[in-house]
Amino acid sequence: MRRATLLLAGLAVLLALPLSAQTVDEIVARYIKTIGGMDKIDAVKTLRRTGRFTGGGGFQATVVFESKRPDKVRQDFILQGMDGVTAYDGHAGWKIEPWEGKKDAESLGEEEFKSIVEDSDFDGPLVNWKTKGNKVEYDGMEPVEGTDAYKLKVTVPNGDVFDYYLDTDYYVPIKIHTTRFVRGEQREYETSLGDYKEVNGWYLPFASETGMKGSSQTSKINWEKIEANVEIPDSRFTRPPEPGAVPAAQPGPAAEVR
């Protein structure tokens, strides 16, 4: 009898695995279909978002967020005439913080670098998640502000975890819980998403609110305009040279052979 019980328990586990995987594939497929489908997503090569940032205490700033396939990203934070920049060129991240009295580019800290690498994922971690090496698990349903939502646990290759909560009617993310590990320390953030609108056939959130888990202090971004397939040169993402640095020699015309 015990042997039969163990066999049945093992069979239940084996049956549950493909069911769970199928559930993940179904939910992600519905999500991709709802936001426009892979053809529409792949057709977008660049995005430029322009909007307003509202931080704790109500102070506001202009934000310009530029993305370019496959993994370039830049954020300009414009406050009182000062333009702070955080950027990633696909290999290295850098920043300029004029309000700290710094006018030259410097490297990002560990958490800043992790954050911008996450932002550089042009389509987000659910699109083509298997190709990216991400692990996605269906984690049941949980209420978000009184409404049931599908919960997908996304683990990226560096070990960070994103819990995506997707609306059960439209299958779009309405909340993301981020668990990031920095020097062995766990840090958690929560982001609420909304106001989805079409951009070149791709539905994107125009509003977000982010804060550390358990904190009443949050920051909001409302995108006033999102433009697709605008011309963005690669130089926008490249770290400026150090002051006094000698520019790299450019190849000249080939010498005439006599």
Image (spheres, helix red, strand yellow):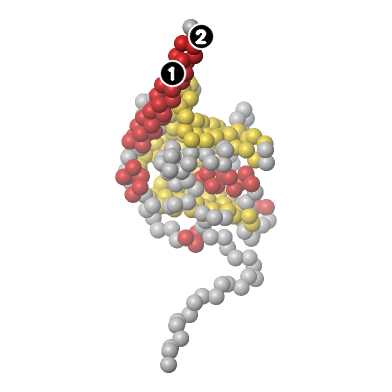
**Percent of width and height locating residue 239:** 57, 60
Q: Nearer the viewer, residue 186 or 102?
A: 186
Q: Mark 1 falls on what kind of element?
A: helix
Q: Earlier in the sequence, mark 2 or mark 1?
A: 2
Q: Amino acid at mark 1?
A: Leu
Q: Is residue 60 among what the camera can see?
A: no
Q: Quadrant of the C terminus?
A: bottom left
Few, some or many residues within 10 Å of mark 2 (<14, 14–19, 20+): few
Few, some or many residues within 10 Å of mark 1 (<14, 14–19, 20+): few
Q: Amino acid at mark 2?
A: Arg
**Percent of width and height locating residue 29:** 35, 34
Q: Is residue 169 among what the camera can see?
A: yes
The numbered dot on residue 2 is 2
Q: Residue at x 63, y 55 (%)?
A: 107
> Where, by quadrant of the figure, is residue 167 drawn?
top left
**Percent of width and height locating residue 119:** 51, 45
Between disc 2 and disc 1, the foreground one is 2
> Where, by quadrant of the figure, is residue 211 drawn?
top right
Does residue 214 appear left or right of residue 41 in this picture?
right
Q: Mark 2 falls on what kind of element?
A: helix
Rounded to the nearest angstrom, the CA distance separating label 2 from label 1 is 14 Å
Q: Residue at x 41, y 40 (%)?
A: 127
Farthest residue toward the top? 1
Q: Residue at x 49, y 11 (%)?
A: 3
Is 197 placed above or below 8 here? below
Report which residue position mark 1 lands on: 11
